[in-house]
Image: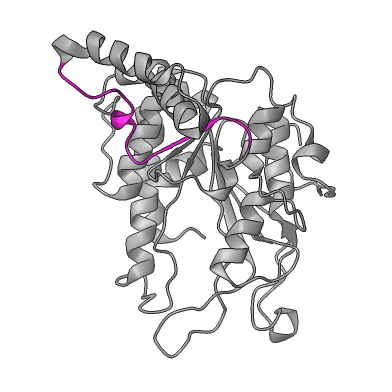
Amino acid sequence: GLHPNLAPLVPMWKSGQMAAVHAVGMPAPNRSHFSAIEEVEEADPGSAARIGWLNRMVGLSEPQSSYGAVQIGLSVPRTEIYGPQATLAADDIEKIQVYGPVNAMGQRVASLEATWDAAAGPLGQAGRTGLSTATDWSPVLRVPLDPQNGAVYPNTDLGVALAQSARLVRADVGAEVITVDHSSWDMHTALGTLDVGNMRIMVDDLAKSIAAFFTDLGSVASNVTLVTISEFGRRVLENGDAGLDHGYGNAMMLMGAGVRGGSVYGTWPGLQASKLVDGDLAVTTDYRSVLSEVIKMRFPAVSLPTLFPGFSPDRVGVMAGA
């Protein structure tokens, strides 16, 4: 049942390291990119606190690291990592350093520290944080830049971001969660077929990038669980521009450590007209139920009621021990 361009992931499926959950999504349809993304990434409906669920999670885990949640590929923090806990967002991890001549770096750092150590207000805090981050991050930059184990990434935004993610994992500096945004799935036009079109291109990039990521990690992959999620699915019927508009029910994929792979989970509601919700695939599994099983297995110290306020997860069974 996999799209043919997911072929690079078939070995993970056959070895029990990859699974999917169908008909997953939010409790109620929300077809606005902006409000849907915010709701998914906050995972706290009705709250005005504007704290991302990943930010809450790293604040609840023990022990807490300096930057438990890291976003790679975008330097502006997404809602999911935004909040009171220290997190890091960078478009390129190679840039997280103090720039200047190597033979004068000591003097440059000393000068910056003298400038910002006693500076008051948000600007002073930002200066001190920038310097301490560059220091904390230096072990990552000493990890080999080239992919390991013969991994070959596509030369795409996702491929580059996952290559940097693998490097960060190998550095083992305390990052508990890495988040990567993979855009351009909003296929209102030219969705295409199995042979041509936007879906084929995106699926090809996704599969090749993820396969390279796990190859790159090698034995370290036993410590990594990868989860895909989107703010909504697409409509069932094609629109007038050979595409699909914003929908409701969606799918999540899980790969790596702790995944009960080789199976599809969730209750499939069917595509009969009587089963659709305003023309969309119905949601039978709340996305937070899937995330709850991942958190329970990988971060057992985290309190799920605190992480997802007011929510009681249903059993999905996609993770070991669920």
Residue 139 in view = no
Question: Is residue 263 shown left or right of residue 172?
Answer: right
Residue at 52 percent of width and 31 percent of height: 121
Above or below, 271 against 210 in this view is below
Q: Position of residue 100 (x, y in %)?
A: 19, 22
Question: Is residue 105 shown left or right of residue 238?
Answer: left
The foreground one among 189 and 133 is 133
The foreground one among 288 and 259 is 288
Res. 145 image quadrant? top left
Quadrant location of the C terminus in the rendered image? top right
Q: Position of residue 46 (x, y in %)?
A: 77, 58
Q: Which residues are magenta?
A: 84-101
The foreground one among 14 and 146 is 146
The majority secondary structure of the magenta stretch comes to: loop
Q: Position of residue 165 (x, y in %)?
A: 40, 33
Residue at 37 percent of width and 39 percent of height: 162
The foreground one among 126 and 76 is 126
Res. 142 image quadrant? top left
Residue at 54 percent of width and 67 percent of height: 33
Q: Is residue 89 magenta?
A: yes
Residue 244 in view = yes
Q: Is residue 114 magenta?
A: no
Q: How is the image coloured?
A: one colour
Q: Position of residue 164 (x, y in %)?
A: 35, 33
Report the number of discs: 0
Residue at 33 percent of width and 35 percent of height: 163
Above or below, 264 against 178 in this view is below
Above or below, 146 against 232 in this view is above
Residue farthest bottom in this picture: 240
Above or below, 65 against 213 in this view is above
